[in-house]
Every structure is written in C-alpha cells, then in structure tokens.
Amino acid sequence: MSEKPWEGRFSEKTDTSVESFTSSIHIDKRLYKHDIEGSIAHCKMLAKVSVITEDESLLLIQGLSKIKRDIERGNFQFYDSLEDIHMHIEAALAQQVGKTAQKLHTARSRNDQVALDVRMYLRDEVTGIIKSLVELRKVIVDFAKLHMDVILPGYTHMQRAQPILLSHHLMAYYEMFSRDLERFKEGLKRINVMPLGSAALAGTTYPIDRDYTAKLLDFPKISTNSIDAVSDRDFIIEFLASASICMVHFSRISEELILWSSSEFGFIELSDAFSTGSSIMPQKKNPDVPELVRGKSGRVFGNLITLLTIMKSLPLAYNRDMQEDKEPLFETLDTLKACIDIYKKMLINKEVMKQATSTGFLNATDMADYLVTMGMPFRAAHNCAGKAVNYALNKNKELHELTLKELQTFSPLIKDDIFNALSTQHMIDRRKSFGGTSTENVTAAVRQAEKSLEEEIGYLKGDGNK
Ligand code: ARG
C-alpha cells in the first residue's frame, strides 16, 4: 500500500521486513485522536498566518474530522507500510481531500508532531489518574473512618512492636497516595508544554504563530528550544518514575493484605468477590488481586529503566530509538490505572477486619513509660521492663497477666494503676504526639483528610487541574 513521503530520494522499494521492523502503528494508533486534534490546530494556524488559505484549511479540517470518525467506527485500515499513526492519517487525508492534503505537513515534521501527540495524550491520561487517585484516597479515608475501633499490632523488623489503630495504618497509605498525586500534578506542568513549530530540529522558515497553536490546544506554554523540544523525553521518564513510586505503594499495601489474610496473621478476610479459589485444595481462598498488583509493579519499574536506557546515550536531536518510548509508557499507564481501579473497588468491598490479638508484649514500652512517670530514668525503666518480659516469657504469660506482686518484684514503684497503663486502648490513646496513633489524633487526621478531599473534589469538578 501507498507511496512513502520520502520516495523522491529513493530508487529502491523498502524491503517488507524493514517495513514490519520499523512500523509502530500497532502501538501508536492509540494517539490518533490527539494527532488529529494537533493537525486541526496546525491547519488553523497555517491559515491564520496565510501559509494556506481559509478554504484549504476548512477542507483539511473536514477531512481530518471524517478520519477521526472512521477510526472510531472501526472503519479504518492500518498497514505496516505506513509506519505510524502520523503517516496513516496523512495518507487517509490524501484519499479524502486529494492534493490539498499535501499542504498539511507544511512547517512541521513528524519529530515535533510525535512530541506534541504524546504530550497531549499523556496530559489527558495523567489528568485522569489524578482524579482516580483522589477517589482512591477518599475510599481509604472512608474505610479508616469506619474502622476507628480496630486495633492492630504495629510492627518493626516484622516483630510485634506497639499497638496501633488500623485507621492510623491505613492513613499512612493515604499520605503515600497524596504524595503520588502531588508528583503527578507537578509532572503535569512539564508535560504541558507545546513543542509544535520546532519542525525537524531547527525550527522553520515559515512565519508560524506557535502561541496561537498553543492557545488552540490549551497549552499554557510553548517550548523554547527547538532541538530540546524534539529530543526531550524527560516528561515521560518523570511520569514513569512517579508511576513507579506509586506502584511501590501499591505493592507494599498488597504485601500487607496478603500477609494479613494468611492464617498465620488472620487479621482480615478478603471478600469472596476479590479472591479466587484453588483447583485442588478446597480450603483455599487466595489473595490473587493483591498478589497480581504486587507482581505488576515489576513491569512498571522495568519500563522506567527501559526509557532511561533508551535515552541515556542519544545524541541530539531526534533519533529513531525514541519511537521505543511508547510501549513502556502505554503499558505503565494501563497497569497503573488498572491497579488504582481495582484497589478502589476492593477497598469499597471491605475485607472483614478482625480484632487482632494483643499478644506479643506490645505493652512493654508502656511498662517502661509507666515507670518513667513514677520517677525512674528511661534507660533503667527499659531494663526493668525487659526483665519483666523475660520473666513473663518463662511463665508463658503476657505482662498484664502477671500479678501485682510479681510485677512489684521488678520495681517497688509499681502500683495497682499499672494495669490501666498496660491496657491496649490506654496505650493507643496516650500516643497523642502529633502524627501518633491516639484515637483523638487519627480522628483529627481523618477529618483533615476529608476536608482536603472535599476541596480537591470541588476543584476537579471545576476542571481546574489543567
Ligand atoms: N513514529 C516515530 C516515533 O514515534 C515518529 C517520528 C518519526 N520521525 C522520523 N524522523 N523518522 O518516534
């Protein structure tokens, strides 16, 4: 099918193996909408500066709009020989409007065109991800609010450490996803720069109006260096890095849900709708969703490394290597969006939270703190509580199961009120330092998060995030 735009300079036909090797149409066809929008804006600009006539511009725009409809209706043929989406649309335009189609590419190269398309595409996708992360954070906050009374053992080194509120634990993820959201928003500023008009690499001789194109395409800024504009993929790398960090968070929460749903932990039971069974072991209920999310993080990290590696030795300006940027970008986008969506649904579906047992000497620090309030220096108190733990371990008991008499053998400072200090709820509620796990703090954190989400949701509804 079809002539190549560069045919004039060539005397031999492209080998078919080269056509299929260099073709990227199966990947970049998803840029069609943005490619067409970019071309329409380019046409309007060319007419405005009188490089083409108004009539020509209208004809081109009609043709482009028809192609968009055809693609959307599945009425469009893709061929390897036409390499990429840009050439497909140009060729289809020639069929639609004849010779005038040849004017569309005036003052433009595929190098600045592809940079424009990816920026527009990614801008839309990141805007969607930002919305979706706001919703996920809302689900987490609602969940935390609902389970304010559930106490879990907190861990360090995977050893039971101190009791915490489950809500406090979940709000830690709220914080992580809030930082992710900020990173995506921040990156959006650098995605949102209009490169068209840089042409192949050096700019163009035509009297183009780049600001006008930018205005039509809703870009707040145009690129300032044509060489950089066609060879910059930082904005993709940055997105892949932010996505990778976000996937670290998904992978960590997944790991916890997997552990917590095991009979060894027994803290939660995943809802049936989000678990699968085993084909051989009837008793099993497997946490496949969090396992797959954890597993998929590998691809996302890999995609970041892929793009860093592609870019690291490329001389300026455009090199064909850069065509390889799209597959990792699209895969990361698809994976990240899928993970956010499944988590929103899974958390709404609410796992059954069980009160975890209060065993494991979670109150040893509190015994030490109690002794400090009774006048003992902390180091000595720590030592004293350690001895009590050792004693209780030998007796196969918890600290609060020892008698007052037994406890007093470790220090005469110990009084009857120690049992209050060793109770789980008391331990939680005394951790009032800002950012700590007390019910009061966590309730305030949830309230604060609700307030900020309300503002964010209002802002998103006003579509003020561009
Ligand atoms: N398909 C190409 C890409 O994605 C478009 C740019 C091609 N430019 C060129 N000079 N061959 O990078």
Image (tube, rainbow, N blue to C red):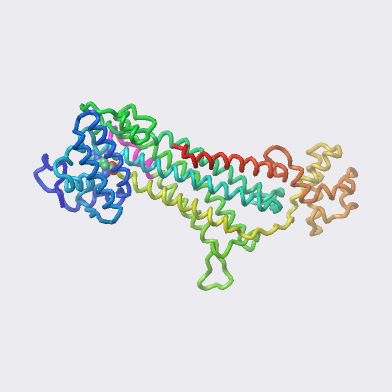
**Closer-to-camera residue (401/394):** 401
Of the 4 image quadrants, the one containing the C terminus is top left
Q: Nearer the viewer, residue 96 or 205?
A: 96
Kindly identify the residue that appears in the image at 22 percent across and 52 percent down.
Answer: 80
Q: Does residue 318 belong to the magenta stretch?
A: yes
Residue extending farthest left: 11
Instruction: Classify residue 89 as left or right of residue 277.
Output: left
Residue sitting at x 50%, y 51%: 340
Could you say where residue 206 lies in the image, as x and y percent from the top left? Answer: 21, 28
Residue sitting at x 80%, y 49%: 422
105 shown above or below 135: above
Q: Is residue 247 magenta?
A: no
Is residue 130 visible in the rendered image? The answer is yes
Disc count in the image? Answer: 0
| Location of residue 297 in the rendering, given as x and y in whole percent from the top left corner | 47, 51
Q: Is residue 28 left or right of residue 95?
A: right
Residue 181 image offset from top left, x and y in percent? 51, 41
For the magenta stretch, what is the residue range? 306-319
**Quarter of image, ligand 1:** top left
- Residue 18 makes an appearance in the image: no
**Would residue 20 be found to the left or right of residue 459 on screen?**
left
Residue 175 picture location, percent across and down: 58, 42
